[in-house]
Amino acid sequence: MSPPPPFPNLPTIPPASPSLTNPPHETTPRKIALSFLATEQSEGAGARVRRSIGSPKLRRLSPFLMLDHFSISPGAGFPDHPHRGQETITYLLAGAVDHEDFAGNRGTIETGDLQFMTAGRGVVHAEMPRQTESADGIGSGSANVNVNVGLQLWVDLPRRLKMCEPRYRDLRAGEIPRVVVDAGRVEVRVISGRSHGVDSVRELAYTPVWLLDVRIRPGGRIVQALPVGWNAFAYTIAGTTVFGGAGGDGQGGGQQTVPQHHNVVFEQRGDTVLAEVPGDAAETGHFILVAGVPLDQEVVQYGPFVLGSREEVYQALRDYSTCSNGFERAEGWRSEIGRAMMGR
């Protein structure tokens, strides 16, 4: 799939300010508002996901609608399905995933790659694993990955853009800048946003979002600045990480030790997030840190349709069922990759 032209009128990363550059001497660490385990469940056709945002424990955290940590074994996947009214960010941690939609767009993301999709007024697509030789984790060598693992984040669109034209942007692993701090003990992949003076690729999504992939070796520590007033969370992919500053323990307090597969939601107040891994830890702590501009708007969601009212959701269902008003190309369409999985 050839890359589309840049999105017009995209919001850009805010200009440098004391809260967005290397943290000044006076900073306010964000406290932890909520921390919970993302339990595993079935999704799609045989896939397994750990859903944190979008679950009963956290329905949404504006602008974020859903976060899935997915695992797709051979023969499983996400066959043809629609979307309207949101953006999706798919980050592949291991393996390779094919994508195909009703407009004829096709492509593959591999280990360390991302795909940003704006559904806008309507998309019908399929996401299926490709069994191939791929890296077993970012930069760790070659292995045959039988299970494809990644993260998918759903981001709400501003109301004025709910019916925009759908678009895609792939971000390859080699395009993502990295920054190393704390004497080499901390590495940050700056997917979107800024970390310690390093900026990301800019034009990725309509809704301003920061997405940082952080790895902390035992004994490492990071103080990461975030835009003031944005909602923020961390999701722990591997290892155990200590979040927050001293002066408390547990929910709503200071430091908290968080094992893998947990979502940590931070309070809005504050301009930095603190994270560290004890020197005696058995493994590297690996997590994503995500922040986004809260959208002051009503959200009515029915599965893959995310609109501003019940009437708009009903209209989306009618449009999809009648192949109209954005779903015209769905009539008679079936993805090749979906057919291959279904064996016909």
Image (tube, helix red, strand yellow):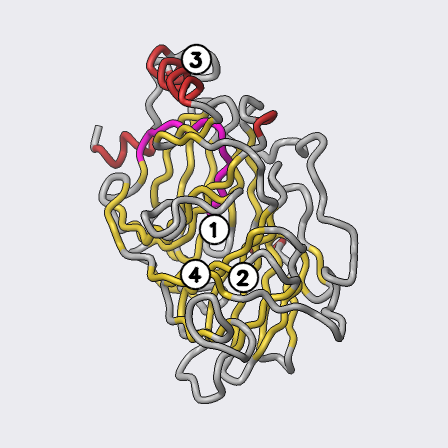
Q: Residue at x 42, y 60 (%)?
A: 263
Q: Which residue lies under the disc numbered 4?
A: 34
- The local crowd at label 4, few if under 14, some if 14 to 19, many if 20 or more residues have their Cα within 10 Å, is some
Q: Which residue lies under the disc numbered 2?
A: 213
Residue 16 versus residue 130: which sits nearer the camera? 16
Q: Looking at the rendering, which quadrant does residue 11 occupy?
A: top right
- The local crowd at label 3, few if under 14, some if 14 to 19, many if 20 or more residues have their Cα within 10 Å, is some
Q: Is residue 244 above or below residue 322?
A: below
In-image side of 292 versus 13 (left or right): left
Of the image marks 3 and 1, the number of the one nearer the N terminus: 1
Q: Which mark is residue 340?
A: none
* Image x and y of residue 286, in percent: 47, 68
Of the image marks 4 and 3, the number of the one nearer the N terminus: 4
Of the image marks 2 and 4, the number of the one nearer the N terminus: 4
Q: Where does the magenta region start and end?
A: 79-91
Q: CA distance from mark 2 to mark 4?
A: 20 Å
Q: Which residue lies under the disc numbered 3?
A: 328
Of the image marks 3 and 2, the number of the one nearer the N terminus: 2
Q: CA distance from mark 4 to mark 3?
A: 43 Å
For label 4, the SS is: strand
Q: Looking at the rendering, which quadrant does residue 237 occupy?
A: bottom left
Q: Which residue lies under the disc numbered 1?
A: 91
Q: CA distance from mark 3 to mark 2?
A: 38 Å
Q: Is residue 257 above or below residue 108?
A: below
The label nearer to you, 1 versus 4, is 4
Amino acid type, residue under disc 2 in the picture: Asp
* Residue 145 seen by the camera: yes
Q: Is residue 322 above or below residue 62?
A: above
